[in-house]
Image (cartoon, coloured by chain):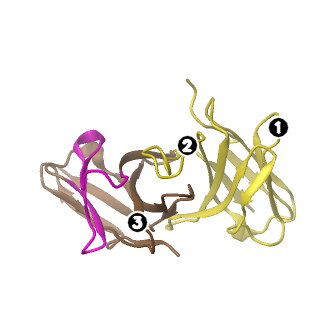
Chain colours: A brown, B yellow
Amino acid sequence: AQSVTQLGSHVSVSEGALVLLRCNYSSSVPPYLFWYVQYPNQGLQLLLKYTSAATLVKGINGFEAEFKKSETSFHLTKPSAHMSDAAEYFCAVSDQGFQKLVFGTGTRLLVSP
Amino acid sequence: NAGVMQNPRHLVRRRGQEARLRCSPMKGHSHVYWYRQLPEEGLKFMVYLQKENIIDESGMPKERFSAEFPKEGPSILRIQQVVRGDSAAYFCASSPRVLAGTSGAGELFFGEGSRLTVL
């Protein structure tokens, strides 16, 4: 069975600081990996996805993530946090042949001025 | 192009009543997924449907919950005899028909959710 683990239910950064949200996955087959963002009382929006092409994936709003097979990780980063980045971020995994996504428990990003 | 539409956005029910949540997928999408989000938790997969077929219902509780995606009309998630533990946000997502292993595989488009409160 596939799963993802997101370390840290809450991450606090100052505006302008580096954002690092951690995600480790478990999969018996080459995975597809996703990061979604959820703003309060809204649905999930895709930030970026890894589908076995380039290991460094760039997404929207300046976010990027790097797939590291040796570490089974897919951490999300952004060089400089903005107040508008405050939201909940979910890492998800699926196998290539099936479209069911398995989500982590989420990390709430807090950005202070 | 409208996104995934869910209604109602908010629903209040008393214990023992029925809740019906509707989801209209994006135009051209033939796959629908329902997820449940409990407070302070991630999204838990419930069911995956294509038109007139349930593909995977491994996440559905065995009793009181059912889902359908008829040939015409929206997908419906039905919860009978609701209990307080059913209070949650229910999200619908849709995807187009894509080939497994292609770059589009696995990407889901989410609605804004239906928030069920059971009194």
Residue B111 colored in magenta in the image = no
What's the residue at 22%, 42% (across, down)?
A: A62
Are there few (<14), some (14-19), or many (20+) residues within 10 Å of tag 1?
Answer: few
Task: In the displayed orientation, state which residue is furthest to the top.
Answer: B1
Determine the chain carrying the residue at label 3: A
Question: For the residue labelled by badge 3, is the local secondary structure a helix, a strand or a loop?
Answer: loop
Question: For the residue labelled by badge 2, is the local secondary structure a helix, a strand or a loop?
Answer: loop
Q: CA distance from mark 2 to mark 1?
A: 20 Å
Which residue is under mark 3?
A30
Task: Give coordinates of residue A95: x percent, y percent.
Answer: 49, 62
Occupied quadrant, residue A32: bottom left
Task: Give coordinates of residue B27: x percent, y percent.
Answer: 63, 29
Q: How many marks?
A: 3
Confirm whether circles 2 and 1 share one chain: yes
Q: CA distance from mark 3 to mark 1?
A: 34 Å
Which residue is under mark 2?
B98
Task: Give coordinates of residue A51: x percent, y percent.
Answer: 37, 53
Determine the chain carrying the residue at label 1: B
Which residue is under mark 1?
B71
In the rendered view, would you say A52 is above or below B42? above
Residue A51 colored in magenta in the image = yes
In the rendered view, would you say B69 is above or below B13? above
In the rendered view, would you say B78 is above or below B94? below
Q: Amino acid at mark 3?
A: Pro
Question: For the residue labelled by badge 1, is the local secondary structure a helix, a strand or a loop?
Answer: loop
